[in-house]
Image (spheres, rainbow, N blue to C red):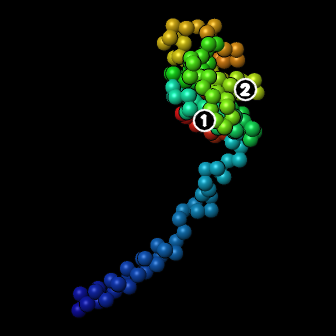
Amino acid sequence: MKFRIARALFPLAALTIMAGCQATPPAKAETMQPPAAASNNINRLLTIITSPDPEIQMMSLVLTRAAQTEGMSPRLMLCGPAGELALKTPPEPAFTNFPPSGRSPDDLLSGLIASGATVEVCALFLPTRNLTEEALREGVGVATPASIAEDFSAPETRLISF
């Protein structure tokens, strides 16, 4: 007899539990927002470029310039092979012109510097090449790990890396 009652009540209990689960909204549903909507104060862009490929360098600079045009304050850190863009005499691939603009990574980097973007090489770039800051083009500095970490940790900063 007990078995029959338990057997009869089990489907009812299961339906009650399922209905309760479906009717209960997820916790904090009212406060959940997509990342972009969570903060309207995103106004800085940190672009980290390490790729030696001039096409990738070009696209990263195009996107950084586009963000600057939209009102973001860009900061670029060039590291590894991409750091060579920051030299007074960059390697030949930096002068590769790309359609449709016919401009090169060197052109775009110069334009970003002229328009007020912060451009730096990573802290390891110069020492690993036995170079000093004298080797860098005008308007390029050396980033410190602490300042980069502070920037990419800030809620008002977006980070892109190539």
Task: Give the residue number, with chain letter if any, for mark 2.
Answer: 111
Q: Nearer the viewer, residue 33 or 76?
A: 76
Task: Give the residue number, with chain letter if any, for mark 1.
Answer: 59
Q: Position of residue 114 (x, y in %)?
A: 75, 23
Asked whether the viewer can see residue 10, the reply is yes
- The CA distance from mark 2 to mark 1 is 14 Å
Q: Earlier in the sequence, mark 2 or mark 1?
A: 1
Give SS at disc 2: helix
Give the number of callouts. Answer: 2
Decide: few, some or many residues near mark 2? Use Cα within 10 Å; few <14, some 14-19, many ≥20: some
Disc 1 residue type (three-letter): Met
Proximity of marks 2 and 1: CB atoms separated by less than 8 Å? no
- Which of the image's four quarters has the C terminus? top right
The residue lying at 51 percent from left, 17 percent from top is 124
Q: Position of residue 54 (x, y in %)?
A: 56, 28
Q: Nearer the viewer, residue 137 or 46?
A: 137
Q: Quadrant of residue 84?
A: top right
The residue lying at 48 percent from left, 12 percent from top is 128
In the rendered view, tell whether residue 75 sits above or below residue 39: above
Q: Nearer the viewer, residue 13 or 125?
A: 125
Asked whether the viewer can see residue 116, the reply is no
Give SS at disc 1: helix
The residue lying at 55 percent from left, 33 percent from top is 56
